[in-house]
Amino acid sequence: MQTVPRRPVITVLSDPAVEYPSDLSELPDRVEVRTADEASFADAVDGAHVVLMWDFFSGALREVWPRAGSVRWVHVAAAGVDTLLFDELVDSEVVVTNARGVYDRPIAEFVLASILACAKDLHGSHDYQLQRVWRHRETRSVMGATALIVGTGGIGRETARLLRSLGVSVTGAGRTARSDDPDFGEIVASRDLAGVVSDVDHLVVAAPLTEQTRGLVGAAVFDAIKPGAHLVNVGRGPIVDEAALAAALRSGQLAAASLDVFATEPLPADSPLWSLPGVAISAHMSGDVVGWRASLARQFVDNVQRWLDGQPLPNVVDKRLGFVSSAGVGDRA
């Protein structure tokens, strides 16, 4: 257990364009809080003991690492830590935690909404409305559909529970295959994904980005997937091979894709994904419900109090795996 300094310094890296976490005013009086943007981060992190990556997509910590010799704990206000981890941090004794739990339900609801919109052709109805065209169609039922969720962490599990409540048959894909899982029933190995997608109606990507998941959903998976299937990506963009995705959409092998994350964000204006049939695009917002920033701030305040009290920190990231590994709960991908 780490010894807590008498008056620990917390440095908050915040993007000036993003709302600052006002709830951090509830941090205990015994800590000193410094706020910084990327330009002032090097000076602010010098002598700091804790870093809050409120600007969770920033790679600035790597750049100022030589000045971060006092840092003992880094908290990322996000579920994914792929933009944070670098060799020096991974090899150090610095503890990294994430915002696991805050996004679970909002993202699960987003996945459910995406599946319902696809099954009921709501995007098609909107397109016809813009054309003032009255066109009757038949839609598909969600009850009885099959879903395979890639990623068996908190987000994937909440998604599985929500989909099962509507009568969707759900399985998971994780690092290791296993049976009798409380949320998924059956979990298949992610490396075998192409061999298990032939009867999948909705393929949901909710995994973190690691070396094992990068490019996991590619041409082999799309070639093997059930014709007319629907892809939902709420994990990270590089998990899906976007060129292979575009080819599958053009050929009709894949009927639809609901995409919230992309290899390059914002999605470039010249990306073919904008205009391919069946594609619904959102701006990396699946977990951003009203009040989400306040929830992130409250989580950090609670964690700081635990740290000051000498209690174990929740959501400790296995820096070599790239996610929080919880025995008995399941891995992320």
Image (tube, rainbow, N blue to C red):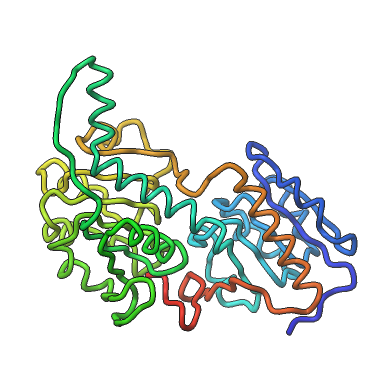
In the image, 250 versus 290, the foreground residue is 290
Left or right of 176, for residue 296:
right
Quadrant of the frame with the N terminus: bottom right
Where is residue 195 drawn, in percent x and y?
A: 15, 70
Quadrant of the frame with the C terminus: bottom left
Residue beneath the point at 28% across and 71% down? 190
Where is residue 25 drawn, in percent x and y?
A: 81, 51
Question: Is residue 325 shown above or below 249?
Answer: below
Where is residue 48 drawn, in percent x and y?
A: 78, 63
The mark total stands at 0
Residue beneath the point at 68% across and 51% down? 13
Q: Name the residue at the top extreme.
A: 132
Where is residue 55 drawn, in percent x and y?
A: 61, 49
Left or right of 126, for residue 79:
right
Residue beneath the point at 38% across and 76% down? 182
Left or right of 121, for residue 71:
right
In the image, 115 versus 286, the foreground residue is 115
